[in-house]
Amino acid sequence: MGYFKDALNGVAWMGGLRGSTRILAYIKIAVLARLLGPEEFGIFGIASLVLAFLEIITETGINAFLIQEDRDIRDYIDTAWIVSAARGLLISLLIVILAKPISYFFNSPDSYEILLVACLIPLIRGFINPSIVKFEKNLEFNKVFYVRLLLFFADTLVTIISAIVFKSAMVFLFGMIASAILELIISFLYIKPIPKVKFELSKIKHVVNRGKWLTLSGTLNYFYEQGDDAVVGKLLNSFSLGLYQMAYKISTLPLTEAGEIFYKVTFPVFVKIGGDLARLRKAFYKTTFAISIFVIPISLVLFVLLEPFILILLGANWLEIIPIIKILLIYGAARSISGMYSPLFLAVKKQEYISYILLISVAGMAITILPLIKIYGLAGAGMAVLFGWVISLPLTIILVYKVLYKGTVKKRLII
């Protein structure tokens, strides 16, 4: 059975989703950039850094595990829900405990209250029915489209209305909380099976053991993608962090979102054809070529028309981020294309390879970010991120070659 048609259908649905959500995201950014200043963006940036970090270091890899499994996922839904709920509670408690020290670390007293409210988000998300992952596992990307678009629309609408009323960094959290509550409701009302409170220690150990490499790779990926934000926020200030994060969003969102479309679709497809190396090679090359011809023109257009784009979207107060965006555009395009290794390695259960690549990237960025920021300011942070990708590229090529040509892939049950 071939999955090319399913993959194209998935790309179309996920492309529609990403395109729709990016339009909403740019509308939200354009509105908030005029209602709020870089200071508010920076304060929220601190909260998002903490939330993302705690979510990553406690990552169990449940979704990837359920997609990888050849057996019926109903056998693990109860266990997945227990693990997810416990994780959400743990993250919430950690945020409450660390809120005050973190606000001191970033010299941002205003971030304390933001962090206390942010603890509600992982708590709510932890109770979402894990059965929702079966849409991706079964390549039902039309259902993913409708659910995710509705959630993003709710987030955007609540955030904008809240910003008009309150004009504070707290409005970002209101949107995220509303979206999390809506997803929780949908997952139990419309998605089956519904999990039960059933504690099975052997299954919990199996899930956690399978997810250990995803936890490590997620942690390393966090340091690679968010470490520059933390350094900017610490060395400079929340105003500079707001500028840098805005530059990062503008430059990488269109490119990484394109990558996410392909990663989301190809992972379950690669899982289904993983027992046939010839098909896997062909599928990998096709998707890498497809993402290249999509990402490169977008990055070139943004690079050339950057100044009028910033003026229209954000206004003249944000023009100083243009040099940073140009550097990050190169990084975003390069990483989106090379990032096809991630679904490939996950599909053949070589999660450790992702960790190896990210370890090199983090090391490269860590070594260069301080001196580059001192010399080039905010642009130096972007240079350090780009350097991290460059030095990890040779290892990426070697490991992809090993999987596609020298590795052995176990036969899988096609479902």
Image (cartoon, rainbow, N blue to C red):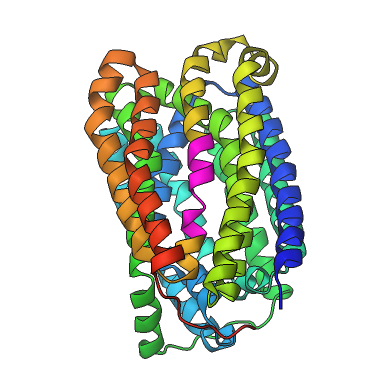
Residue 21's spot in the image, x, y percent? 70, 44
Spot the residue most to the top.
316
Which image quarter is the C terminus in?
bottom right
Q: Residue at x 68, y 80 (%)?
A: 192
Quick check: is 272 in the magenta stretch?
no
Q: Can I make out residue 143 in this image? A: no
Look at 66% across and 31% down and name the residue there. Answer: 297
How many marks can you see?
A: 0
Question: Residue 46 is drawn in which quadrant?
Answer: top left
Is the residue 197 above or below the residue 155 in the image? Answer: below
Residue 200 shows in this picture: yes
Q: Is residue 106 above or below residue 188?
A: above
Q: Position of residue 281 (x, y in %)?
A: 54, 63
For the residue pair 398 and 47, the one nearer the viewer reads as: 398
* Magenta range: 333-343
Residue at 46% across, 64% down: 404
Q: Residue at x 71, y 78 (%)?
A: 1
